[in-house]
Image (spheres, grey):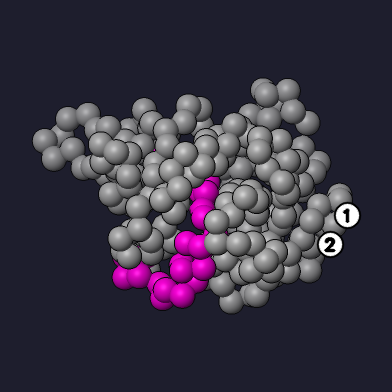
Amino acid sequence: MTVVAIIPARYASSRFPGKPLALIGGQPMIRLVYQLALKIPGLEAVYVATDSQEIAQTVRAFGGQVLMTKSEHQTGTDRLGEAADLLALTDSDLVLNVQGDQPALNPNHPALLVQALLSDPNLPMATLAVPLLDPAEANDPNHVKVVFNHQNLALYFSLAPIPWPRDGGPGSFYKHVGLYGYRVGFLRQYLKWPQGRLEVIENLEQLRALERGVPIKVLLAEGLSPEVDLPQDIAKVEAALSGHGQK
């Protein structure tokens, strides 16, 4: 069984164009993410999947591996599906979707996804969540929230604060961390499905799987890696990297 990490990276982000090339501590963010992905235990290779020649040139310049993919992909998962085909992976192989906007990622977190998929051969997909202790963060639409059942299988993902505390008491929220592990056979199925109704409403690609009845295992992790959603997030990421002793 082959296990690879793929970092989907597009230049034309609506909120932050050129985000993968944004400089953090003097280095392109895509380079920092790639270097962290190389530290994930159990991987055979790391690739960047992009439709941007500028991103591809940057990755090749620091010695990274690139897969050129189509520009019309609606989501990062769609891009990963094409990348898996370009690599000629088998249906039983595993792919990690490492988000290109998490340059302070703990490499042990995505390793949890690999372990979950290896321990349950019937599991098609897994992802991560962390507790949200600050109510203000629960109400922030930049944070995706997730609810799950007693087996830690996802029930729903939303930008809204879910579950909603109807009586005004304190809520119990979990932030979805946008890392995924997939079986390649599932990725190939995903590519055949049109976007789902809820996926379009929430603009959350993982809802396409839930709408089709696909189980998504939610693994709980500790510690929150700051993400770069907007240019003003770069400062907090640089502070986090400095705190970790990284440069």
Residue 130 vertical placement versus 93 (above, below) = above
Q: Which residue lies under the disc numbered 1?
A: 61
Q: Residues within 10 Å of mark 1 (few under 14, many from 20)?
A: few
Q: What amino acid type should be assigned to the residue bearing mark 2?
A: Gln
Q: Is residue 40 magenta?
A: no
Q: Are marks 2 and 1 in contact (CB under 8 Å)?
A: yes
Q: Picture coordinates of residue 196 (x, y %)?
A: 35, 70
Front residue (pair 235, 31) = 31
In the rendered image, the quadrant that contains the C terminus is: top right
Residue drawn at x 38%, y 64% is 208
Query: Is residue 246 among what the camera can see?
Result: yes
- Residue 145's spot in the image, x, y percent? 36, 44
Question: Which amino acid type is shown beneath numbered disc 1?
Answer: Ala
Which residue is the site of mark 2? 57
Q: Is residue 29 left or right of residue 131?
A: right
- Region in magenta: 175-199
Which residue shows up at 51% across the image and 49% down it? 180
Q: Indicate left or right for 17 with 221 as reference.
A: right
The secondary structure type at the circle numbered 2 is: helix
Left or right of 234 in this view: 74 = left
**Residue at image x 74%, y 28%?**
246
* Residue visible at 61% across and 43% down in the picture: 102
Q: Is residue 184 left or right of residue 35?
A: left
Q: Secondary structure at mark 1?
A: helix
What is the spatial separation of the Cα atoms under label 2 and label 1, in whole angstroms? 6 Å
Q: Is residue 127 visible?
A: no
